Image: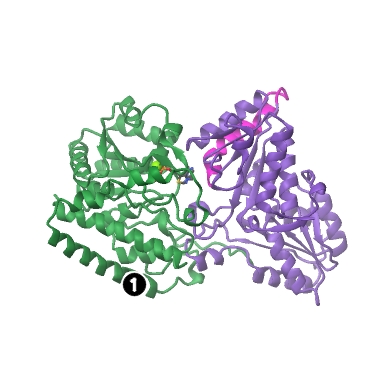
Chain colours: A green, B purple
Amino acid sequence: MADSAALYRTVRLIRRFEERAVELVRAKQIFGGIHPCTGQEAIAAGTCAALRRDDVITSTHRGHGHVLAKGADPARMMAELAGRATGLNRGRGGSMHAADFTVGVLGANAIVGAAAPIATGAAWAARRAGSDRVALTYFGDGAVSQGVVLEAFNLAALWRAPVIFVCENNGWATTTRTADHAAGSITGRAEAFGIPAARVDGMDPEAVLAATAEAVARARGGAGPTLLECLTYRFDAHHTWEHTARPRYRTPEEVEAGRARDPLAVQGARIPVADRARIDADVEQLMDAAVRFALDAPLPDPATALDHLYADGTRVRAGAA
Amino acid sequence: MTILSYLKALNRAITDEMERDPTVCVFGEDVRAAVTNVTAGLVKRFGAERVLDMPISEQAFTGVATGAALSGQRPLIEYQIPALLFLAFEQIVNQAHKFSLMTGGQTRVPVTYLVPSSGSRDGWAGQHSDHPYSLFAHVGVKTAVPATPADAYGLLVTALRDDDPVVVFAPAGAMGRREDVDPAALAPVPLGVGRIHRPGTDVTVVAVGHLVHDALEVAEELSGTISVEVFDPRTLHPFDWQGLAASLERTGRLVVVDDSNRSCGIGGEILATAAEQMRLTAPPKRVTRPDGAVLPFAEELDRALQPSRDQLRTAIQTVAKAGGFR
Ligand SMILES: Cc1ncc(C[n+]2csc(CCOP(=O)(O)OP(=O)(O)O)c2C)c(N)n1
Ligand SMILES: [Mg+2]
């Protein structure tokens, strides 16, 4: 199990990765933009610390933290964001689809809620294959009224599938407050299907780790799914387009209050100052190398744009002939 | 005259219709804060009762719009992403669209489905870059793809007044267009009536949505050698077959540029109908996305799969010089 320093390191890595990625968006080195997970790092760090390398996760549009915490190489992740041939997905996926099957990342997903049944299926298949692997799926508060998520709860509960549902409740779905889009409670949705559910301090990596470890033990032991509602706050924009468009839906006071508890500070306070400085310096080096790797990496060849469309390499007609 | 942007045209169409008809209401995600800007100012002007922020429950709120339409309201739904149409497909195609016939004409379903920024939107990758207008034309839902601000205004107004479900695609590639218009001349544009943006005598280019502007540029470039007529169908279902036939009477040669996937895209239907029923003096061509394309993330890969001006130019040149049918 991860120690305090390792958890701090993951939080720090995600934080710096996001800050560097935002800089690359501003510099137009990242095409489009990203949904930064700044402020929400404790959930990724704590949950993944409770998983084995062969366990699997699915992620969301705000997924960089999950992918990094599960063990993907930050350099190849950054190269993916920069649309390079050496990125995790060979430049085909970008920020919202980062996947690394070598470390159990079945993919981030750009459709809210869509991954919950996919993780449930992966969990079912692991058990069917005789493995004690578990699946863990992230989604935001905005996903809890998506029918497919509730349908996945039902299937997971019926089959006692070894899946952990992790809701990152950051209080907002884009510009809509949780209270304005979700009736009842989030934990109550799971409980209605007989799924044990808990609210967790999503700003504290160790609290998240403890709750996830319990849920993982239950899943591996054959007792079925758990829902963890992790309470957190998104420090930055919904998406980097907000940096220029600046829609007003959160007051500066709210943002300031939301940022008051910072997972970096929460976890940083638990380790000696010298260790913290050493980790920070390591992460800085790692991120410098990651950005350099990404920007030096080759662009994909347009002639390969349809590669990987089909498993068997089936070729299709071009758009002009 | 004043400058009208495409975005403002959509906003104005909704505002004017809400002003005119108290049953018009707006459903969507983040429509009060207006993250797409299409619904800017609406909640302030018309109140929260008529401008509803929806949970991320596309199937449900699409069905809710159908129920409301059966009961006297005229909802407009804004979908933030073209792929959300896939989530709501059952509710649109199998529910809203089928009510009129299945009830023997007892009811109508006046719902408008608006997709601002359809097609590739620079860096949003595989699940956000589809352009599924041909799917809706195929199943028979009325489908509009305006190319210009004035047409965006006119077609959206018409969609809101229409008694059937209508899907309006506002292509990402057209959303930035601006045009000098006489505000008093802004008017509804009927469904099923195309528009000739540029008359010509050698080749007819049918261009859909944002590709109209590419077609106009290519037509201008080629003007010294080939006289290109640019025909914008404006709506894909119903389609202005008469207008196309009249154009082909003049040119006898046809190129279609269409941001659909090639197989079963509207471009194929246009070529087939022209071949069956219209005057063609040479084999026609189409420029589309590849069969079954999924747009990859990286810019150069994304661009490689969308119809390009180069491809269109080559297709026009080929069709212009092609010998007649043997
Ligand atoms: C099914 C679906 N509907 C709408 C969207 C557009 N969208 C992207 S993120 C988002 C808000 C998601 O909120 P939440 O689940 O709370 O996650 P957060 O962004 O807060 O991390 C919306 C509406 C989408 N991607 N998928
Ligand atoms: Mg949220």
Q: Residues within 10 Å of mark 1 (few under 14, many from 20)?
A: some
Who's the residue at 39% across and 32% down the image?
A150
**Residue A91 in view (yes/no):** no
Q: Nearer the viewer, residue A21 or B135?
A: A21
Q: Which amino acid type corresponds to the residue marked 1 in the rendered image?
A: Phe
Q: Magenta segment, principal secondary structure? A: helix
Q: Nearer the viewer, residue B326 or B320?
A: B320
Give the percent coordinates (x, y) of residue B57: 49, 35
Chain under label 1?
A: A
Q: Nearer the viewer, residue B106 or A294?
A: A294
Who's the residue at 75% across and 40% down the image?
B158
Q: Which residue is mark 1?
A: A293
Q: Residue furthest bottom?
A: B224
Who's the residue at 22% across and 63% down the image?
A280
Using residue B251 as the reference point, say whether residue B96 is left or right of it: left
Which quarter of the rendered picture does the C terminus of chain B lie within?
bottom right
Magenta residues span B82-107
Dot 1: element: helix
Q: Residue furthest front?
A: A253
**Residue A265, magenta (yes or no):** no
Give the percent coordinates (x, y) of residue A175: 47, 42
Who's the residue at 80% across and 50% down the image?
B241
**Residue B105, magenta (yes or no):** yes
